[in-house]
Amino acid sequence: MVDFANAMEYAVCREAQAQLEAGRLDGTLRLAEVAAWALNRLPALYVTSGEGYRHHMDRALNGLATEVTEAVRRSVQALQNGDPLRDGTVFDRARFATPRGMIPQLRRLFERESLSWRDLPKAVGFAAGKKAPPPLPQPVEPSPERAYSWRVGAEVRMYLARAKRKDAGATRPTAAAKVELAPEHLDLYVLQPQWGWINLMEEAVTTAVEQIIAEEFPLEGCPNPAEAIAYALNRLPSLYATSIRGEAYSRQRATQTLARDIRIQARSGVVRVRCYPKRAVTSIPFAVVAEECTAAMAELQGILGRDDLTLGNLIPAIKEACPPIREKFHKADLKEQGEQAWQRGDIPARSPPTVSSKNSIPATRTCVCAWGCCGWKRGNGCRPKRRFRRRSNWAATTCGCGLAAPRFGSSSAIIPKRAGCTRTCWAGIPKT
């Protein structure tokens, strides 16, 4: 489970969007490629607490604003000139089938920018037309004598309970406050799966920290491994990738060129966290996303009637059970492809051409006439270019139902059947 996020991603993503829109590019550059190139040349600003979020976000938007703008500008120029790691491919969406990665997909499906796992069951139930459960039956109001007896008994029980706690010196336990993830923290947390990039350095540092804890501190462990990982990531270069080729290159660099530096910084992070186990900061509860996902999936199994519901088949199951979602999914998919084709590399789907005429040729066929007399175009049917009267010095070509039979005077020649036209068209052909 990832319990940290990079504040620099938000600043770079915002700047890349502004420059791509201002440049009016033709859609050959994807936002993910531009952002990944710039992030690999800017310092990482990973956060695990609310105080760190405010500090690093202010530094990314204000302190490093000039560096961010320059890095994005150089990224656009480099990608336009040609980047050897750019192959035009994107990661499969199944790669982001995690509690964190499914949130952007569900937001696009329901067209709600603030949708979270906590709101998903209610949204699915409303879209599926499920009625709210009937209210519980109200208890029968007791008689005054019985109510008085019950009230006296309750007061006696409460008095005895207070006396028992007072004698034992125990205090009344307070209910634990409900932990929620702030919307701005959640938006930063899901930026990677939203735009389709990954940082291979996160995986390498996480593995190194786990190995160091298991080898050097097997008994004591580490109070906060996420903070140790973020400490190391902020002192190492980023390895962002948006394609399979870029992932292979970044993984090779992490395991060979930067292996020693990763080990050193990971150990420094573990030692620092062990020296200062308690800090006066408020941790960002990124783990709440996984907990809300587990609760939402259990509730969705009852709503959708699917015991085999997983993150992999969640979206198909929602589309199958929700008629409004199923009807507008094609429209939503086209909207996403149209608006984000230049970020994701998708090609907007086009609906097949329709032909109004009953006798016209299907759009999947091609009208082939012997002498090219049919000026047929896709979707317009078979239409003649010219019409001539039958004269002795002209020959008429008849195209009918796949059979072309040009006649020259008294002679006739039969041409093999061809797929195509259902109309008769005439063309003037010089008599030879």
Image: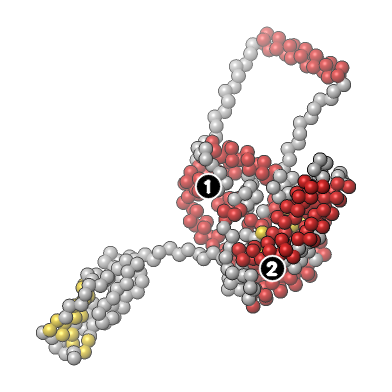
> Farthest residue in the front direction?
215
From where the camera sits, is residue 57 visible? Answer: no
Circles 2 and 1, Cβ within 8 Å, touching? The answer is no
User: Where residue 34 appears, x then y in whole percent?
Assistant: 66, 68
Point out which mark residue 46 bears: none
| 163 and 272: which is toward the camera | 272
Point out which mark residue 37 bears: 2
Residue 73 found in image quarter: bottom right
- Residue at 56% x, 39% y: name it: 300
Q: Earlier in the sequence, mark 2 or mark 1?
A: 2
Q: Residues within 10 Å of mark 1 (few under 14, many from 20)?
A: few
User: Where residue 113 appears, x then y in whole percent?
Assistant: 63, 53
Q: Amino acid at mark 1?
A: Asn
CA distance separating discs 2 and 1: 33 Å
The residue under label 1 is 313
| 252 and 340: which is toward the camera | 252
Q: Amino acid at mark 2?
A: Trp
- Residue at 80% x, 64% y: name it: 62
| 221 and 200: which is toward the camera | 221
Q: How many marks?
A: 2
Left-right relation of 220 to 112: right
Q: Considering only vertical position in the picture, is 187 above or below 390?
A: above
Q: Residues within 10 Å of mark 2 (few under 14, many from 20)?
A: many
- Residue at 67% x, 41% y: name it: 291
Left-right relation of 250 to 310: right
- Residue at 82% x, 57% y: name it: 264
Residue 341 found in image quarter: bottom right
User: Where residue 274 appears, x then y in whole percent?
Assistant: 86, 46
Which quadrant of the rendered structure holds the C terminus? Answer: bottom left
